[in-house]
């Protein structure tokens, strides 16, 4: 089970992914979400972009770094 910090970061990432997929969100906001996700998860390689699902494909995910970044969003 993820720690509270990791769970928070995963929720932040899910929110940004939702914003990118939402047709009602401006391109400027989508670009911001892409940048935040890259900071949290690393490069947006489609095969690696699966941290919130827990896939082992994501090799750039660092739980400690994510928890530190998550503190920036509180």
Image: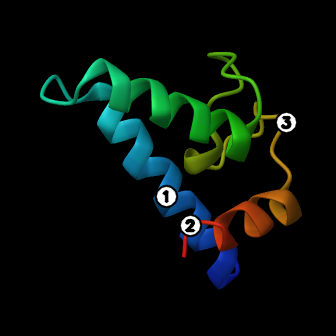
Q: Position of residue 3 (x, y in %)?
A: 70, 81
Look at the numbered disc 2 and give the secondary structure of its residue: loop
Mark-to-mark CA distance, 1 and 3: 17 Å
Is residue 4 toward the left or the right of residue 59 in the image?
left
Which residue extends farthest left?
Answer: 24
- Left or right: where 22 falls relative to 20: left
Say which of 48 and 15 sits in front: 15
Residue 47 in the image: above or below residue 53 = above
- How far apart marks 3 and 2 lie (CA) works out to 20 Å
**Based on the displayed image, in which of its 4 quarters is residue 28 positioned?**
top left
Callout 2: few (<14), some (14-19), or many (20+) C-alpha neighbours within 10 Å?
few
- Can residue 32 be seen at all in this image of the molecule? yes
- Which disc number belongs to residue 70? none
Q: Earlier in the sequence, mark 1 or mark 3?
A: 1
Residue 9 % position (x, y): 60, 63
Residue 51's place in the image compared with 69, above or below, is above
In the image, taking residue 73 as reference, residue 19 lies left or right, namely left
Looking at the image, is mark 3 or mark 2 earlier in the sequence? 3
- Could you say which disc has been placed on residue 12 in the image? 1
Outermost residue on the bottom side: it is 4
- Where on the picture, by quarter, is residue 20? top left
- Callout 1–callout 3 Cβ contact below 8 Å: no
Which is more foreground, mark 3 or mark 2? 2
Residue closest to the far front: 28
Question: Mark 2 sits on what residue?
Answer: 73
Q: Earlier in the sequence, mark 2 or mark 1?
A: 1
> Disc 2 vs disc 1: Cβ atoms closer than 8 Å?
yes
Which quadrant is home to the N terminus? bottom right
Identify the residue position indicated by label 3 in the image. 60
- In terms of depth relative to the viewer, which is nearer, 12 or 54? 12
Residue 1 visible: no
């Amino acid at each position: 089970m993820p720690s509270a910090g990791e769970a928070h970061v995963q929720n932040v990432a899910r929110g940004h992914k939702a914003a990118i997929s939402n047709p009602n969100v401006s391109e400027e906001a989508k670009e911001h979400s892409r940048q935040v996700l890259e900071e949290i998860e690393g490069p947006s390689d489609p095969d690696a972009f699966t941290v919130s699902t827990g896939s082992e494909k994501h090799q750039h995910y660092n739980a400690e770094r994510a928890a530190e970044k998550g503190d920036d969003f509180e």
